[in-house]
Image (cartoon, rainbow, N blue to C red):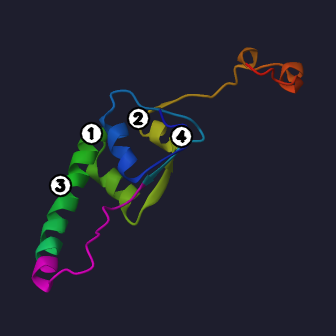
Amino acid sequence: MVLGECSSAAIWPLAACRRRIVTAHSVLLFHPLKWESGEHVSIDEAAEWARHFAHLEQDMDGMLARLLGVAPEVLHHWMKPGRYVSGKELAAAGLAELVELVPQVGLLPSAAARRRPRRPS
């Protein structure tokens, strides 16, 4: 269930869920895999990482699309250059259930109870 923001790596566990629940206030940030490296990397190591990174990014995008059950083109549209997708959009794409959050007034303390000082235990 996504109540607020779900972005970056947090999308992976959501994608793996059989049932996904979102609200009108949910927002999901899809973006390309980010490349980070240490400060002191040799040119040979950087070249090898760049070659590997291109393969890794393509493979991971394909896996995420399969987990979500969405065409790779849809995922590509959301990820390049990076896009916030609303809960409503995710539900409209058939990837999640849209639920309305309804305050449970009976579970909240009354205004009078909130004003009473608490007694030490």
- Give the residue pinned by disc 1: 67
Of labels 3 and 1, earlier in sequence is: 3
- Residue 99 % position (x, y): 56, 28
Q: Amino acid at mark 4?
A: Lys
Indicate whether 11 appears above or below 76. Answer: above
Who comes first in sequence, dot 1 or dot 2?
A: 1
Q: Is residue 7 above or below residue 53?
A: above
The main secondary structure of the magenta stretch is: loop
Q: Earlier in the sequence, mark 3 or mark 4?
A: 3
Q: Which residue is mark 3?
A: 59
Give the distance between the C-alpha atoms of the residues marked 1 and 2, in whole angstroms: 13 Å
Residue that lies at the very extreme toward the top in this rendered image: 106
**Placement of 59 over or under 34, stated as above or below:** above
Q: Residue at x 47, y 36 (%)?
A: 91
Which region is colored magenta? 30-47
- Distance (Cα) linking label 4 and label 1: 19 Å
Q: Where residue 94 is drawn, which disc sits there?
A: 2
